[in-house]
């Protein structure tokens, strides 16, 4: 099946639709394939890693678009490229790029979540990689002021130990958002939607560094950045934790954990009310994210996941919907 490498909509040949090029490259030509392989990327990363500003343990390479060609760079990158990981995972490690791409598209197309512009792209040997456009740079290349919630909450190995990214709760993350975002009433609803979405797709790595705020020049205030690093970790790690962070502050256990052994829709609605949403609004958001089943299933089927991984992704969504439907 020929489809857009970004939106997954049918095309006469694999590439990018006009709408995808607009998001990825402001309507400029954008290549469907790069001229380097997975092996080349290892050498490139070894050569540039000390000077790159991209954090995290997943292998990433910074790219710049010049005259319709994507070129690896040490500085001034406009895109982040992630190939399939070199380390062995319990299952489906070659599906990691397709997983992240699908999950980002589900968030953007069907779940009302603003995401970084993203796509799959072919390496020179035909292997699939994931690519995302950086949103922390202006079109001229200057840096936009941005802080992740580890920085905002003073979480580091020195202050909170080895697992500092996970040393908090979503309730505390929301309290920190309230402190730094004047438009909290709007931004809290966006944050709540993302938290519930991460549970729906079984993203057990939605930790503090995967939520950020940045300063929009036209307003001057800080708001949530587009969502990034969304994927179903359970697809690759069957025994992964159901949540990266605790739901509530302190040692309080959600009622669903006490009665069912896992968080339920009622627990997330309670979180929403603690974040300042009304009970009906929090309920509506949970219901919206559990809906559109046929459209979600269709997008999974049109994704670049392997057939076995697609079935597992369907099963994950079905399992999490059941949990969220418990009120």
Image (spheres, rainbow, N blue to C red):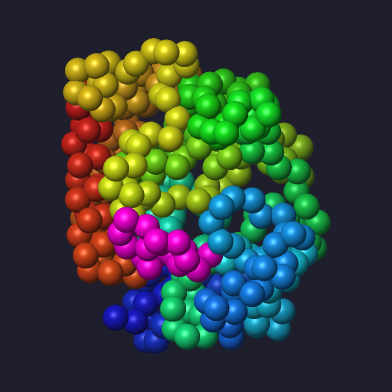
| 317 w.r.t. 170: above or below | below
- The residue at the point 33 percent across, 36 percent down is 242
* Residue 244, picture quadrant: top left
Residue 248 visible to an observer of this rendering: yes
Where is residue 323 shown, x and y percent of the image? 22, 33
- The residue at the point 47 percent across, 13 percent down is 250
- The residue at the point 22 percent across, 25 percent down is 261
The quarter of the image holding the C terminus is: top left
In the image, 96: left or right of 210? left
The quarter of the image holding the N terminus is: bottom left
Where is residue 71 shown, x and y percent of the image? 68, 77
In the image, 122: left or right of 242? right
Which residues make up the magenta segment? 82-98
Where is residue 218 shown, x and y percent of the image? 75, 44
- The residue at the point 26 percent across, 55 percent down is 313
Could you say which is closer to the camera, residue 291 or residue 324?
324
Could you say which is closer to the camera, residue 123 or residue 59?
59
């Amino acid at each position: 099946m020929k489809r857009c490498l970004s939106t997954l909509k049918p095309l006469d040949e694999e590439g990018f639709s006009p709408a995808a090029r607009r998001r990825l490259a402001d309507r400029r030509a954008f290549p469907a394939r790069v001229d380097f392989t997975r092996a080349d990327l290892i050498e490139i990363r070894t050569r540039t890693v000390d000077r790159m500003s991209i954090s995290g343990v997943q292998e990433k390479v910074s790219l710049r678009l010049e005259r319709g060609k994507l070129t690896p760079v040490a500085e001034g990158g406009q895109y982040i490229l992630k190939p399939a990981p070199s380390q062995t995972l319990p299952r489906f490690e070659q599906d990691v790029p397709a997983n992240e791409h699908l999950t980002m598209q589900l968030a953007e197309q069907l779940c009302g979540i603003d995401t970084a512009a993203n796509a799959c792209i072919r390496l020179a040997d035909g292997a699939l990689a994931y690519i995302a456009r950086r949103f922390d740079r202006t079109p001229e290349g200057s840096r936009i002021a941005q802080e992740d919630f580890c920085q905002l909450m003073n979480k580091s190995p020195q202050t909170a130990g080895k697992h500092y990214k996970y040393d908090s709760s979503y309730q505390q993350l929301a309290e920190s958002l309230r402190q730094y975002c004047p438009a909290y009433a709007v931004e809290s609803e966006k944050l709540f939607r993302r938290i519930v979405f991460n549970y729906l797709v079984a993203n057990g790595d939605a930790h503090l560094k995967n939520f950020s705020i940045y300063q929009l020049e036209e307003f001057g205030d800080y708001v949530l950045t587009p969502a990034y690093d969304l994927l179903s970790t359970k697809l690759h790690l069957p025994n992964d934790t159901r949540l990266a962070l605790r739901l509530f502050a302190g040692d309080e256990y959600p009622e669903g954990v006490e009665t069912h052994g896992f968080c339920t829709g009622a627990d997330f609605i309670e979180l929403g009310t603690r974040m300042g949403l009304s009970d009906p609004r929090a309920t509506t958001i949970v219901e919206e994210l559990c809906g559109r089943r046929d459209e979600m299933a269709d997008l999974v089927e049109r994704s670049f996941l392997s057939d076995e991984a697609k079935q597992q992704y369907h099963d994950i969504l079905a399992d999490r919907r059941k949990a969220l439907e418990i009120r």
